[in-house]
Amino acid sequence: MRRRVRTVLLFAALAACHFSSTAAGVAADGAATTEPDAPVTPTARCDGKPAGTGDQTWTITSGGTSRIVYAHVPPNYDPTRPTALVFNFHGFTSDALQEAVLSLMNDKADSEGFIVLYPVGTGAPLSWNAGACCGTATASNVDDIQFVRDILAAASDKLCIDPARVYATGMSNGGFLSHRIGCELADRFAAIAPVAGVLGIDACTPSRPMPVMHFHGTQDSLVPYDGSASLGFPSVASTFAGWAQRDHCTGDPVETYRNGNASCSTYQHCDGGADVTLCTINGGGHTWPGGTPVPSLGLTSTDIHATDAMWTFFAQHHL
């Protein structure tokens, strides 16, 4: 508990400094190599959209409750041009502004021209209902999948969103939720990239093959790499293999990235071009690779930048 308190205090200080983050560094190329056929993009709703850019705060009613989403719209956003959208979910005991600082995603959004949404969980401390994890959101069975649907509807009303290029990532509890989104909202999300979170629900039957890029440290003390029977967390290896099985991947995974303590392996032959990648940080802690370091939670690798690598992955996958 003391570790979690120190982490919250550290992030609060960081978030108070700025919401627009520092550059994440050099991109990690080659983490995924299989590209699907050119998609047929659904029609985006773009008439009469305002041209507002920068940081925004939305209040959305979901399940009879008012909830908050922070939006970061890049300066080159064109309200007449369908734009990619990334959901970035914070971890248990963290919050949306801390997630922006941790992941350093705003600068990537500005340079690549995509929109980032940072939704806020429920309870005290804040949490998401992602099955095995975490907090009061799970205990109270909060319908966070419906909340995501409601956010998508609001985003489509407010902004010119490309419905074929909607993606999910998140840290820890937010990573768990990203996996759940891959299972239950495969018709709305083109790909997912969880960080330090495993699959926490028993039944996962996506409506289409789901591209996945998972980042995890071998010395993660909160979501152990080898799983935890007492916490009900599966291992990273079983989560990786499970996605490969659902996506009907054939052959063995091949190494697609190696640099220092970071390496990625990819199932490249899966239905619908839905390659499945696992990036392992040897000695890495419960941290965001290439992001803002949190020393109390272990090593933060600089040998791969998760935000850069996942955007490269996302850009290869459309509905």
Image: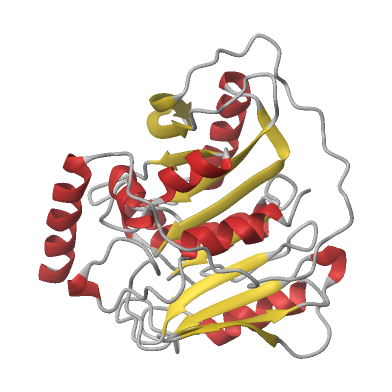
Considering every residue shown, the one lying at the far top of the view is: 48
Q: Where is residue 31 in the image (x, y as percent from the top left)?
A: 63, 72
- 231 vs 105, nearest the viewer: 105
Task: Give left or right: position of 19 versus 39.
Answer: left
User: Within the image, what quadrant is residue 213 found in?
Assistant: bottom right
- 38 vs 135, nearest the viewer: 38
Considering every residue shown, the one lying at the far front of the view is: 26
Q: Does residue 130 appear in the picture of this structure? A: no
What is the total number of numbered labels drawn onto the structure image? 0
Residue drawn at (10%, 69%) of the image: 2
The vertical placement of 316 against 59, above or below, is below
Q: Position of residue 178 (x, y in %)?
A: 54, 58
- 102 vs 212, nearest the viewer: 102
Task: Give left or right: position of 308 versus 124.
Answer: right
Task: Give left or right: position of 106 versus 319.
Answer: left
Residue drawn at (73%, 60%) of the image: 206
Q: Does residue 304 appear in the picture of this structure? A: yes
The vertical placement of 230 against 25, above or below, is below
Q: Position of residue 312 (x, y in %)?
A: 62, 59
Residue drawn at (57%, 38%) of the image: 113
Q: Position of residue 20 (x, y in %)?
A: 33, 39
- 239 vs 302, nearest the viewer: 302
Colour pattern = secondary structure
- Which quarter of the image is occupied by the N terminus? bottom left
The vertical placement of 151 against 201, above or below, is above
User: Within the image, what quadrant is residue 278 found in?
Assistant: bottom right
